[in-house]
Image: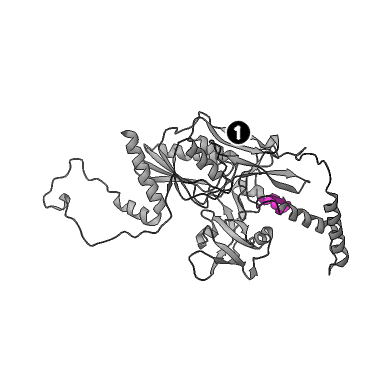
Amino acid sequence: MKSVFQSGMWKNIALGVALSSALSVPVMAEESQTEEATPSVKSLPLDELRLFTEVFQRIKSAYVEPVDDAVLLEDALRGMIAGLDPHSAYLEPSEFENLQAHTSGEFGGLGIEVGLEDGFVRVITPIDDTPAQRAGVKAGDLITKLDEHPVQGMGLNEAVELMRGKPGSKIILTIVREGEEKPLEIEVVRDVIQVASVKSRMLDENYGYLRVSQFQVDSGKEVNKHLKRLLENDLRGVVLDLRNNPGGVLQAAVDISDAFINEGLIVYTKGRLQESEQRFSATNTTLVPDLPMVVLINGGSASASEIVAGALQDQKRAIIMGQESFGKGSVQTVLPLTKERALKLTTARYYTPNGRSIQAQGIKPDIEVRDAEITLRDDGQEFLKEKDLSGHLDNGAGKTKSSSDRKSNLAERDYQLYEALNLLKALVIVKKG
């Protein structure tokens, strides 16, 4: 498998890449620094170092079983980093390998993005067309048990290891879900996850649908390829669906934004180090600078998704519809420690073109539409129409195909998308006027 780290090993690596396989918090990594990554320390905290040394010695001498020095020190490092924020982490060799696999779009696992919350594992989002999504796992689910193993008290890495396994093997997730009286037990069959990050289709005549499930290395190119196909259908408008998209590669987020914006700022980052401050702007190579568009987001839209939604919103390029996004607006830098280990450290925050920090705030939609299940009312009344009259004249242009059935199916299957399509059609009508 080709690694994104092979060329320019520590340059322009991932935003939103996973801590472990497809089972981690979405994060953002930026230009890694291997030299002078931290400011010089003016003075050592001697009292705290003495306390650390005393605790270390007490464990060595009094713990019920012998403990290796290297194990103790690695655990200390891991705990120190984990105490900073949910996205900083100490990466061991296996986690390094999984991080690379996640950005290339092929990896093993269940296909969910997760994070720790109050000692339990919270599902941020299931990834499209993966075992977890097909089994019925939903964004916001709280995982309390993995098979017979209680999750409370586990570290995220330990929980991730339990969720991994041989493709074809099964695991039972015990889940607490809002609105359900009792915990649910969901059986998921592990598989090798191959994610197609971009999909498209025509929603209705002249109206396209573009789905980005996560931001991989080539997602920007894929979006342009799908847009060209959609444009062959005399495209009048497009819905960009970023719901339950946990993030991905930063450059892909910039490229996808650039596909719709032909000038102006897309995103910028600010941190304590000079290297953490970067700005990304649009080019004039966009395929559809004026095409009416609606962007769908929800609570599972995080990181790179929020960059795209924020840029399109601030640049007045699209109407953002749906529900408030996740609110992951920090930048992680991967810093090499040894040949096999690295430190993933939060080094900056990112901001939308208008200077909004998304961190712990999220993107608020211009029009809020909650997900809903609707049932079309059948009152039994049928109106007599001209075409029902015996001997009626045709319209001179032959029979026309009605799309009412297709719209009804969309309304029942995906209410938010149905509303997005209606809004898109209204935008086109206003633009013509």
Q: Is residue 397 above or below residue 74?
A: above
**Quick check: can you spot residue 170?**
no
Residue 132 rendering spot, x and y as whole percentages: 54, 60
Residue range highlighted in magenta: 82-98
Q: Residue furthest left?
A: 391
Check residue 323 for magenta coloring.
no
Q: Which residue is mark 1?
A: 279
Q: Residue furthest top?
A: 284
Indicate how the structure is coloured in the image. Answer: one colour
For this view, does 386 lie left or right of residue 411?
left
Residue 35 rendering spot, x and y as whole percentages: 77, 37
**Quick check: can you spot residue 30?**
yes
Q: Quadrant of the C terminus?
A: top left
Residue 383 rendering spot, x and y as whole percentages: 18, 55
For this view, does 66 lie left or right of residue 238?
right
Q: Amino acid at mark 1?
A: Arg
What residue appears at the point 39 percent right and 59 percent down from the top-left corner?
373
Q: Secondary structure at mark 1?
A: strand
What residue appears at the point 63 percent right and 71 percent down from the top-left corner?
148
Give the class, few, some or many, for how many residues have Cα within 10 Å of label 1's Cα (few <14, many ≥20): some
Check residue 92 for magenta coloring.
yes
Residue 53 rendering spot, x and y as whole percentages: 86, 56
Q: How many discs mark residues in the rendered view?
A: 1
